[in-house]
Amino acid sequence: MKIQLLPLLLLVAGLIAWIRPKGTESPPVQQPNILWISCEDMSPRLGCYGDTTIPTPNIDRLAREGIRYTNAFCTAGVCAPSRNAIITGMYQTSTGGHNMRTLYNTFPQQTGLPEAYSVVMPPEVKAFPEYLRARGYFTSNNAKTDYQFEEPPTVWDEVGNKAHWRNRKDQQPFFAVFNNVVTHESQVWARKDQPLRVDPSRISLPPYYPDTKTVRQDMARFYSNIRELDDWVGGLLKQLEEDGLLDKTIIFFWSDHGDGLPFVKREVYDRGIRVPLVVRFPDGRFAGTTRPELVSMIDLAPTVLRLAGMERPRHLQGRAILDGCGRRPVDSPLRTHVFAARDRMDTHYDRVRSVHDGRYQYVRNFYPEKPLYMDLDYRRQQPMMVDILRLRDEGKLNATQMLWFRPTKSAEELYDLRQDPHQLTNLADRPAYAAHLKRLRGEMDRWLTETGDLGGTEEKELIRRMWQGGDQPPVTEAPTFTRQGDKLHLACATPGASIGYKFVGEGSGWRVYSEPVTVPADRGITAVAMRIGYRRSPEVSIASLAEVRTR
């Protein structure tokens, strides 16, 4: 029988169109604007995640108009190591950024460390916004970095309290980061005298907290701060609308780790590393959808690069979770496990690793002889922490509330989150769960080896290696100039160095050098180089191209 080819092709095309997921008809935006709205120290305590303690209409709007991820996890339960992983797309345990923290106060009297140090990244590692700048993006960060290193001048066009997409060139695509600190742990006590926006009696307390007036007050303060955050998110969305950019910008909303509350922050249990993650596309594709796939926050960097039309650098350990059409890239397999780590916290050393498959979580304690609770000065500023410690000392905490204060830890822990969401019962020694224990133990062993976990190396030794045996970080070699015709070539002898340049009279900002530069014959140029963790090179300048030797 003779088949009419054209009708058959039309039928097949019609079937493809019919089965295509709703919202994917539009082609991907070329070099889309991308906005990161990040908050601090907040688990998914939002209406869109089922917590109705306090209204969060603006974040809920993002979820209603976007994609809500229900199994997103950070790689550390504390900010600086987590942010190190987010900005590099790599585990902080692979780069040396795992100790909390390095760049500001390492408590040298107690630890014997330098007052501060910038982690020396492996030479191939960059802060990923630099890749975007090299492709023409305007990158801005308002205002927190806290990446465990001083970023090179090539990473951001603007960083600070005035950084904004509005400062870019006309029609220039942007990657803008806005960080809000109102939900940070410190704001529970810093804002304790401000009016509450929720009744403390409405708070649902987890079983590991005693039910006291102070605990409820602090929890109500924390929720009130979340409401303040939501108002701020609404303000950013309004600015996008005023600028005619809401329908031209991909928006991410996320938190750097779990709640800034006792027995949550700094832990690698589910509650310390599970975070909200919402992505809204400008044309409504996949609006209101929920995705349960496992996501690690190291996936954010390759995802942004993919959305910007760029290839994933080979050294990245993260995986893109979205392409320009809002689907998961076919070359980016789903995760079967996510991993997290805890190391030095201020003055206290520990080494804990975790692997999570979405239901079961395995925790390995490398120092089981140490207590789980770390008596940190910073945390004792929180009134409910003081209250909990008082009740502990008076013998008034029940067995569940005393779990945090055990004098030692089990070498291995295993939890079934479906049956035990607060992780109160360790199943590691129960025969019925032996298969899960063996499986996750194997995943942990594989991950530790494949990622080159540096947690087993003493921090002083890590610094010695980073500084090549010296007592100061190395200095990046100064850039060198050569020319070929009217093209200026820049180079730096320090492996992994980023090179910035600017023409005479351009101001304080640096352009990213990624390819030879066309320089007018009579134009002067200045260059600088920096490898992450090294000190900046001296600046070098030429008055004109004529000064430079030919290649």
Image (spheres, helix red, strand yellow):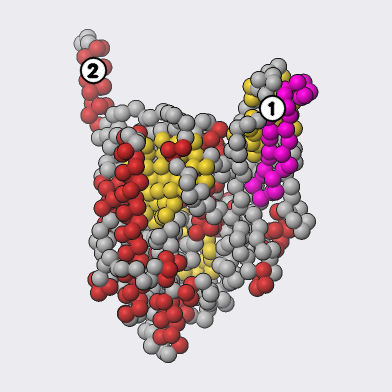
Identify the residue shown where x is 50% and y is 69%: 412
Task: Looking at the picture, tell me which residue is in the foreground, 64 or 170.
Answer: 170
SS at badge 2: helix
Is 543 within the magenta? yes
**Amino acid under disc 1:** Gly
Task: Looking at the picture, tell me which residue is in the foreground, 427 or 329.
Answer: 329
User: Residue 373: horizontal and vertical position, in percent?
Assistant: 50, 75
User: Residue 526: horizontal and vertical position, in percent?
Assistant: 69, 33
Mark 1 and mark 2 in contact (Cβ < 8 Å)? Answer: no
Q: Which residue is mark 2?
A: 10
Q: Quarter of the image holding residue 307?
A: top left
Looking at this view, name the residue that lies furthest to the bottom.
Answer: 394
320 to the left or right of 470: left
**Amino acid under disc 2:** Leu
Q: Quarter of the image for the N terminus: give it.
A: top left
SS at badge 1: loop
Is 400 within the magenta? no
| Residue 494: assigned label | none
Identify the residue shown where x is 50% and y is 59%: 79
Identify the residue shown where x is 28% and y is 65%: 197
522 to the left or right of 5: right
Q: Quarter of the image for the C terminus: give it.
A: top right
Q: Is residue 427 visible?
A: no
Task: State which region is magenta.
Answer: 525-551
Q: Which residue is mark 1?
A: 524
